Amino acid sequence: MIRGIEFRWFHDSDIMGFGVTQLCDHKDPGKVIDHIHNCGGIAVWAHPAHHNYPIENAWLRKLDGVEIWNQIHDSRFIPYYRPVGFFLKLLKSNFDLKAFSGLDMHNGNNYFYLSTAVFAEGNNRNDILTALGNGAFGTRSRFSNIDCSADIFVFYYIYIHLFNYLINIARWIRDLFIHEH
């Protein structure tokens, strides 16, 4: 397990510092990312596709990764198409970005089956962080496997979109039924 800190920088926006254990007083995302890198960590923008956060290329180019799937903010089963599309758009400004996924384990009630398989030479902090930085990892759930580039086959992307559409219809029917009774 690699420790880390989630740094808040804009309302609900966070930058995760994998491998970082020192706090940072800065609210500027560029300085937070610099702090994470100075501590030898990996800087990942947490669930950015859910709000209209201000994006500046200066700090975007410093990021190591972007969270494309968070089981609290997105679907528990597969990633939503919006965060994946947002990640692919951000790749135009930073070709080195990696696609990360997360559980948001702020308490024990938020656990769902989602894992990150890291292909590191060893199981120590430095080897694992090096593997994450080099993109030697992927996300696995019961329903999907996604590599660090979020390179999703077009039919799988359609599957994601259709699956989320069906989930939304089920929620609409559930809400309609609840409000009628």
Image (tube, grey):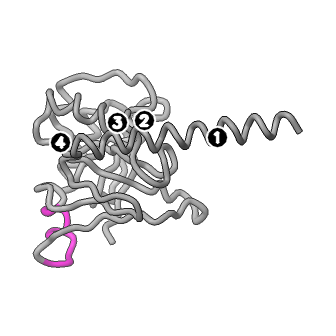
Helix, strand or loop status at disc 3: loop
Residue corresponding to mark 3: 26
The residues bearing labels 4 and 1 have C-alpha atoms spaced at a distance of: 33 Å
Side (left or right) of 152 relative to 113: left
In the image, residue 107 sits, relative to residue 55, either above or below, namely: below
Q: Nearer the viewer, residue 84 or 180?
A: 180
Q: Report helix, strand or loop for mark 4.
A: loop
Q: Which of label 2 and label 3 is nearer to you?
A: 2
Dot 1 or dot 3: first in sequence order is 3
Q: CA distance from mark 1 to mark 2?
A: 26 Å
Query: Three-letter amino acid code at disc 2?
Result: Ser
Identify residue for label 1. Answer: 171
- Percent across and percent down for residue 119 are 16, 69
Residue shown at the point (36%, 65%) measured from the top left: 115
Question: What kind of residue is marked 3?
Answer: His
In front: label 1 or label 3 = 1
Q: Disc number at residue 13?
A: 2
Label 1 environment density (alpha carbons within 10 Å; few <14, some 14–19, many ≥20): few
The quarter of the image holding the C terminus is top right
Neighbourhood count class around disc 4 (C-alpha, 10 Å): few under 14, some 14–19, many 20 upward: many
Instruction: Residue at 14%, 61% (x, y): give it.
Output: 136
Q: Nearer the viewer, residue 74 or 159?
A: 159
Please report contact status of discs 1 and 3: CB closer than 8 Å, yes or no.
no
